[in-house]
Amino acid sequence: MNKFLLTCMLLLSVTVSALAQEIVEVTGVVADVKKEPLIGVTVGVPDAPGLGTTTDVNGKFKIKVERYKKLRFSYVGFVTKEILVKDAFVLNVTLVESELSVLDEVVVTGTGVQKKLTLTGAVTSVNIADLKSNPTSSLSNALAGNVPGVMAMMQSGQPGRNVSEFWIRGISTFGGGSAALVLIDNIERSLNEINIEDIASFTVLKDAAVTAIYGSRGANGVILITTKRGKDGKINIDLKDETIYNTRTITPDFEDGVTYSNLLNESRITRNQPLIYQPEELDIMRLGLDPDLYPNVDWKDLLLKDGAMTYRANLNINGGGPTARYFVSGSYVDEGGMYKTDETLKKDYSTNANFKRWNYRVNTDINITKSTLLQLGIAGSLDTRNSPGIGDNDFWGVLFGYSPIRTPVMYSNGYVPTIGTGNQTNPWVVATQTGFNQNWANKIQTNLALEQNFDFITKGLRFRGIFGFDTNNYSDIQRIKWPEQWRAERARTPEGALIFTHVSNPSELFQRSGSNGDRRSFQDLMFNYDRGVGSHNFGAVARFTRDALIRTVNLGDDIKNGISRRNEALAGRATYNYKFRYFADFTFGYTGSENFATGQQYGFFPAFSFAWNVSEEKFIKDHVKWINMFKIRYSKGKVGNDQLGGDRFPYLYSLGEGASGYQWADYGFDRGFGGMRYTQVSSPYVTWEIATKQNLGFDVSLFRDKINANFDIFNEDRKGIYMGRNFLPGIVGLESTPRANVGAVKSSGFEGRLAYNQKLGNVNLTTRGNFTYSKNEILERDEQNNVYPYQNDEGFRVDQAKGLVSLGMFKDYDDIRNSPRQNFGTYQPGDLKYKDVNGDGVVDDGDRVAIGATRRPNLIYGLGASASWKSLDVNVFFQGAGKSTFQTYGKTVFAFSEGEWGQVMKGVMGDNRWISADISGDPATEDPNASYPRLSFGGNGNNFRESTFWLRNGQYLRLKTVDIGYRLPKQLVNRIRANNIRLFLVGSNLLTWSKFKLWDPELASARGEEYPLPKSFTFGISVNL
Amino acid sequence: MRANQKRDSRLLCWMLSAFIALTCVIGGCKDDNGSSIADALPFDPSKPVVVSNFNPKAGGMGQRLVIFGKNFGNDPDSVSVFIGGKKAVVISVEGESLYCLVPGKAYRGDVEVRVGTNDKQVIGKTDMVFDYQRKLVVSTVIGYRNDRGDEPWMDGKFKDKDQNKMASGFWNPSTMRFDPLNPKHLWVVFDGNRGLYLINFEDSTVTQKRTDLERPRSLDFTLDGKYMIIAEDRGGNDEASTQLLSRENDWQDKEILTKSRQCNGATVHPVNGEMYYNSYGSGEFFRYDLNQYFNGGLGFKGDIQFVVQDPEWEYKVFIHPSGNYAYIVVINKHYILRCDYNWEKKVFNQPYLVCGQLGAAGYEDGVGSTARLRVPYQGVFVKNPAYVAQAKPDEYDFYFTELDNHDIRILTPQGSVTTFAGRGSSSINGDPWGYVDGDLRKEARFDRPTGLAYNEAEGAFYVGDYANRRFRKIALEEVDEVIKK
């Protein structure tokens, strides 16, 4: 190991002093203020990288060094000290613990690194350590509750598809897109592939003051990520290895065959339909006397493992010298799917839903001259997502659809059973016998930056130029096959034999494939100027960017596909502050998009902001010393959103044939020609949405930074939301739908963060909490005028849930006679009774009103606490969402709505469903306030429709992570020349409190037919060498 | 000291690698799934076999029966169940319960379970009696369909242990007719198969008698039974539409009787022996005087009586045994017309609707035009004893198959349509088709039944169930022994 390190150091050392000078041996002890020896302090020579040692168990060191060179003592958590080697060769060094003040913190914004103190806009800088406990491969899943201002919902738990959709400060548009702009090392890139260990800073830009420079692209907020770079000094190696056991938070359970068939029979007889299962058939099923025709299969148990393993490993190396530095990282994640596989196919291929990703990144910084810095960053990722043949799309639908009594897994004669093909195939076949798919994503990202300091022209002038080039390509290969499949009639021949119907012939493995790809090029030129004159501090930034994204694969014959999507922007910022007390900033973006017509392409987006750092005032400084910082910020400005939901060039029209023509010939001859017509009229004035944003914020730091808080109130007016004009009167004479910027949404909300640090003896305690609340209202939308104003979208939230108001169930026929007529098909006692909202005596779609809120939570919050004691540390983090409602539906929620297709989910009927007294023999079961209406078979137009009855509350609070770490004792660690070894255990999604119990409330699904979210246990080790 | 340090560091390295290896091992673990129902104990010959109960308590042949008791063992082959003295087919045995199918003719209804090999059988009985109900049932007489549905057309026996000796095929819509001189001979032709088939109930065989027919659509006999008339569906105006085969030449000769396009069927008037046939292309209804043909000859053309509605009307004519009227069963328009016979002019009058509605396919029992039919195919008049008892003027009901309704319906002289058999087992799935024997309406299913013949002596219907590729029989369950009471 020693030799290895030494070789590495030799190889990586950049400068070797050629001058031969007197070399002396320096020895000594390094200790802290309490005279405790410090173990593992790096002792190096600043301009001789590679040369260095660390202190031993007793804090002693020994190093050979040239005379009159400086020795540097650095240690994590302590202030670095440099001592010139002159005459004394025995040095007893005392290191002082570093205390990083809030005032020293810096953040990365769109115009470079900036002191947090000088900020006038709403910016959140995320502590990366808070995100690291996330057990999935995508960073997006760690945002909810950890990052104030970000609201997120998870789409699926399936490895490789388990990404979260997220919105900054909620949603404030219903137009082309509500996704935030994500920039990684200044270039628009996806958040999902980045390796979290590579991230140096993660910043969320929220208000107009900080997003205006992104002009027509910044209205939905911006996330800025920068990756780690090498540091001057000894080589530093970080290794992290995690083993994660994933199980599921909530997996829907299904009723067994006997219960299912009894409910099925009830659904028939309660509606005067004949039984499906005769009593003796129920006996046969219960006793397992005929597994061919009366099976009782627990498909869930058959298809799903209890859990699966995920492995993650990461290696970082960084170091360098004054002239060049490097950061190299590689990582690997292998997320295991929870699908069971066929043992006999194990050697050939896997049908499990696995996901693997390899990442690498190399960031090199080279000082070309004293004032010129060249930065080269190259990163890449390779993804492979595996899935069962036809099961990638059908797995959950089939599992939820195929009841335990439909067919066995295999007939006793070896035939493969099914009830249909496609998404009605036997689940076991879907999951294991239909081949496998692989989806690959290969990405290479390159960025080259040149920074030049122009201090020699005028002090404070800097230039940065970036050129970026990304190529992404995606392939999918489906290798599909299926066995010969049969269905047995549920009757036997008089000889007792099964009667088979041949459903499908077998298919040998065949292949289908598809691919996709794009490349992006990016240029960015920026001048910064900062100058202080006395108490007056000035700053100015000018920036020019250009961005082009083009499809590279599968362009087809549509010429539009070959044209890159380009954006161009000129942006600038002027800042002024007086004694760091009064701040005034002006920011603008002049941005353009090629997607709009000439004349509509460029827009100007200004923003101004002010801040008053009250704590810098003399009366605070002198009298209220416990206030370390108190700053008030205000900003107002315009930002745009040019997303059109993928539409290209709405200003162009399309012509097509198909209009009626004219017969030019005489009677009896044919010289008819069809006419041309507009298949799409042009919409030449289409342009970006405009958001006018205001933000009022407070930043507070009290009692020597023990208490830290931020609070922001914001509101936003979104105008010119892009949409199709679907309700133009026919008299206009258009055959197609023009597009226009017509919608308007108002949104407002608040967000905050509070952190509290306390030292109790040896225990370091930190608690933190944050919350984001946002509410919106549609002011204007292209919609049909409704007779009842409550049926308009205007005046309600974006995606407001609507439906009927349920009044429970009809008690009896008298109740039906005395209630308004319901126009959704026949109904009986025990069926849902609705409120006649408009009082017209009839319940129909005119009685649909806004019910509940929206599926996307309007409130997201997180609460965390960390404590460290000696070498032990514990972190606990709770996350919750409030004000969320959603309709539930689908074949397992609406029992037997698709006949015998659909399992019955356990718990879906609550504990007192409505049962006719004729069946239960007890009039008490005819409860008008029962938890589930009278059963029905084959759908029920009256009961199964959007109403408050099926509306569920999506609120939840969950114990998101518990992280316990233990640092091995220094003495032990140093013997293998490591600085630090930490063992840790992480549990995530361990507990959930929610009123909704059927599936995970965080899963964005109305049917529950999705891969459930993981509950995971991580055991890991991180080593720093 | 140094050596010690080295050992320590090695130990730590070893621990780390062991830890990493261990985490990998955890991932390699598998879980296996066991079966949920406990395996039943084997049969113990030293203990008695007890029959304590069974479910259901009543039913007919083919009824699923679950018998409860003790010591049934776990091997279906060593268990035999006798109900009413008849051996039942045992599907499975699970120690304290077993599942069997009620055999036919189990009139006595006593239930007996025998477990063990022949020499060492233990018998369990119960005092309870299964209430066996004798009724009309659908059964299968001839044919089989293998799982992949590719069995060949083949002559052979009705039933045989060796499938290769069994008659099979029957892939096309059939028309059939009993030989008027030998009720043990049923003649069948298939639309799309060139053969003339004899189903011989004397020796239970199917034989292809001729192989040279062209789309045969019907067969009938002259009044004296000496000749068979086969209608053929050909394209040209000058091509044969009916052919005459003679009994004395064992049906091996062939003489063209009439020439016309696209004949869907030919019927002989049961009283005066005239022949009536049709043409699909123009919807014409022809009369051909066979008596004149035999007594001095007649050309190839019949007289046009009328045109039924429009061209392209596919229909078959079935004349009432009294000769008073005929039903025109319009296959492709889903309705039935009636035309009365004018004894004076010796012609059929203009037809009128009796049931169904022109072009309105559906399934609905009802009277007259409220009833809905779907591709009615072949019909037969059956004497109704109730009508005879009531001395009604018309003693016959008309039974007909419906290809796409998968059933056999009854049309009464008053025009009421009801369903006689098929479309049962509604619990299996929502389809009205399938292959299920048993109770006519509760269980039986057909799959595109076509040919229909009635054996009056036997009181049995025979159905050419074409998509099931079998011949089915509808009759009262047979009695082969005296019921002892």
Image (tube, grey):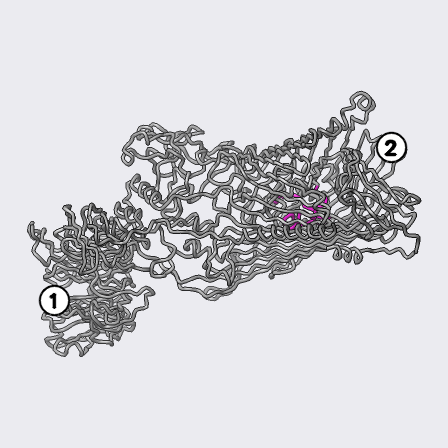
Q: Which residue occupies the foreground of this view, A516 or B183?
A: A516
Image coordinates for residue A436, horizontal then vertical, percent: 51, 59
Establish if B355 lies above or below A505.
Answer: above
Check the image and name the residue furthest to the front: B1
Q: Give the range drawn in magenta.
A: A176-202
Tag 2: residue type? His
Image coordinates for residue A407, horizontal then vertical, percent: 36, 53
- Label of residue B94 in the image: none
Are both tags, 2 and 1, on one chain?
no
Q: Which residue is drawn at 57% across and 41% down?
A: A988
The reply to whether residue B440 is in sight is: no
Q: In this view, does A737 lie to the left or right of A444?
A: left
The reply to whether residue B16 is in sight is: yes
Q: In this view, does A223 lie to the left or right of B298?
A: right
Tag 1: residue type? Pro
Helix, strand or loop under label 1: strand
Mark 2 touches mark 1? (CB < 8 Å): no
Image coordinates for residue A636, horizontal then vertical, percent: 72, 33
Q: Which residue occupies the foreground of this view, A583 or B119?
A: B119
In this view, the mark in front (2 or 1): 2
Does A189 appear in magenta? Answer: yes
- Label of residue B183 in the image: 1
Establish if A236 lies above or below A782.
Answer: below
Q: Residues within 10 Å of mark 2 (few under 14, many from 20)?
A: few
Does A138 appear in magenta? Answer: no
Name the residue tied to disc 2: A536
